[in-house]
């Protein structure tokens, strides 16, 4: 048992290092997309639409890639191929100043498509080891290491934009995107090494699969509805960054620092709520969602940098809880043989509502910030009854065994 847990932890740490460099690449890019698109001439509605469309593509295609990963069991191939797209799309943003904001938007969507290919397969790989050490703890460990990269990337770009300040800002952004190609290349080498070291990762999960039902249970579907509501009201960071830059709440070179702060909170939140999930189940998500629902008024209704930072921190808290608990919950509700499919369906619903919510908030931004904030909070709080229902159903299921 001790040897199996040691192997599981080793696998989780190696995948965590891969996630660190991956997040350094695409989260670094994400931290400056709002001001970058503003410089290219895009509107707030465009930013909201493209951010939502990217998430829509990134999530809905996971239904297909999740099914494919379960049918073929080629988890490693799909993971590596998806990360390779990320390596191409992010550095290519350096060409956008000469080719226009539409080209940049296309690459943003392409990067999310790469994530759609790799995510169900990678989450299934992680679940094999995570269930051996505790699902909440295992996925939280992944998220914490993710966020190290998500903090380093924006800080690195802050340094680039600060050193290249003055005059035309677009060349500085191009340099920043080119530099992000380096950690993207590291990811590919590490993935190949991991594939060689762990050719049969499903053997890491030695515990008996407690979820034996061939279909996805009712608790899963109630949970999915709640997550869809949460996604609809959770504004994407590029829209907040666009707002901070347009209203000059902070200088544009400080925007990636705000993102780094959010990712730092994200990491701590993931660790805290991931461990809470192993002890209290869905109660951890209920607590986190109740708190993070209040990020919008601080981020969008105040011109104070202090309140902007506080809003971003609440947003990061919600992101961390989501990234650790959401995946852990699916891994514990669904049998090993159905996890790729379950992750795919789950993220499809999440992505559709994220897209519609982001687009709606981008439109509302042009008309009324109060309406935007109201929409965000109402949708997030509407998720809570479904989480309570899921919690009750899971508790009843455990008692009947």
Image (tube, rainbow, N blue to C red):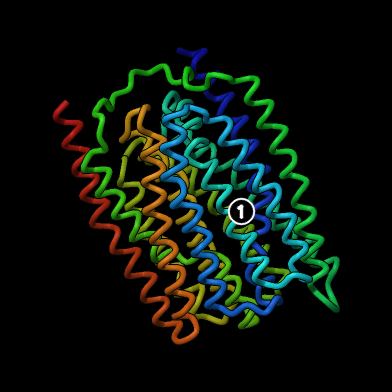
Q: Position of residue 207 (x, y in %)?
A: 37, 18
Q: Can residue 40 be seen by looking at this rendering?
A: yes
Residue found 34% across the figure and 36% down from its top: 279
Where does the C terminus fall, quadrant-wise?
top left
Specify whether 52 is left or right of 384.
right
Residue found 27% across the figure and 51% down from its top: 387
Q: Position of residue 177 (x, y in %)?
A: 75, 58
Camera-side residue of 352 and 207 = 352
Determine which residue is flagged by label 1: 111
Residue 290 in the image: above or below residue 100: above
Camera-side residue of 339 and 126 = 339
Q: In which quarter of the image is residue 134?
A: top left
Q: Position of residue 234 (x, y in %)?
A: 43, 63
- Kind of element beneath mark 1: helix
Residue found 37% across the figure and 46% down from its top: 345
Residue 372 in the image: above or below residue 385: below
User: In the displayed image of the protein, which residue is found farthest to the left?
Assistant: 400
User: In the displayed image of the protein, which residue is found farthest to the bottom?
Assistant: 367
Residue found 61% across the figure and 53% down from its top: 111
Camera-side residue of 179 and 273 = 179
Specify whether 101 is left or right of 58.
right
Residue 45 in the image: above or below residue 69: below
Q: Where is residue 12 in the image (x, y as percent from the top left)?
A: 55, 29
Specify whether 48 is left or right of 26.
left
Specify whether 42 is left or right of 331.
right
Q: In which quarter of the image is residue 1?
A: top left
Q: In which quarter of the image is residue 233?
A: bottom left
The mark tally for this picture is 1
Q: Residues within 10 Å of mark 1 (few under 14, many from 20)?
A: many
Q: Can residue 325 be seen by looking at this rendering?
A: no
Residue 251 in the image: above or below residue 289: below
């Amino acid at each position: 048992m001790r040897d199996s847990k040691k192997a599981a932890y080793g696998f989780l740490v190696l995948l965590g290092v891969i996630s660190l460099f991956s997040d350094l690449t695409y989260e670094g890019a994400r931290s400056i997309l709002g001001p970058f698109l503003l410089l290219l001439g895009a509107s707030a509605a465009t930013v909201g639409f493209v951010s939502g469309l990217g998430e829509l593509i990134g999530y809905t295609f996971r239904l297909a890639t999740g099914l494919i990963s379960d049918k073929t069991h080629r988890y490693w191939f799909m993971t590596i191929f998806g990360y390779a797209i990320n390596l191409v799309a992010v550095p290519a943003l350096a060409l956008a100043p000469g080719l226009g904001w539409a080209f940049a938007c296309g690459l943003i969507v392409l990067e999310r498509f790469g994530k759609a290919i790799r995510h169900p397969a990678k989450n299934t790989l992680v679940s094999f080891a995570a269930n051996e050490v505790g699902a909440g703890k295992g996925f939280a460990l992944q998220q914490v290491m993710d966020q190290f990269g998500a903090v380093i990337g924006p800080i690195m770009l802050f340094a680039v934009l600060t050193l290249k300040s003055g005059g035309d800002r677009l060349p500085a952004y191009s340099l920043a995107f080119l530099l992000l190609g380096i950690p993207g290349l590291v990811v590919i080498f590490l993935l190949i090494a991991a594939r060689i070291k762990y050719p049969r990762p499903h053997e890491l999960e030695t515990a008996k699969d407690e979820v034996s039902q061939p279909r996805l249970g009712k608790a899963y579907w109630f949970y999915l509805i709640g997550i869809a509501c949460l996604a609809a009201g959770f504004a994407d960071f590029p829209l907040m960054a666009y707002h901070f830059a347009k209203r000059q709440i902070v200088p544009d070179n400080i925007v990636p620092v705000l993102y780094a702060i959010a990712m730092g909170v994200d990491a701590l939140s993931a660790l805290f709520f991931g461990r809470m999930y192993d002890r209290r189940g869905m109660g951890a998500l209920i607590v986190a969602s109740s708190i993070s629902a209040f990020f919008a008024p601080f981020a969008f209704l105040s011109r104070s940098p202090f309140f902007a930072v506080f809003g971003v921190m609440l947003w990061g808290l919600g992101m961390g809880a989501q990234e650790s608990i959401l995946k852990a919950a699916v891994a514990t509700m669904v049998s090993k043989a159905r996890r790729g499919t379950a992750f795919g369906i789950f993220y499809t619903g999440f992505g559709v509502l994220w897209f519609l919510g982001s687009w709606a908030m981008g439109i509302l931004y042009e008309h009324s910030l109060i309406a935007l904030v109201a929409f965000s909070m109402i949708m997030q709080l509407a998720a809570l009854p479904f989480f309570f229902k899921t919690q009750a159903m899971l508790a009843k299921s455990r008692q009947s065994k």
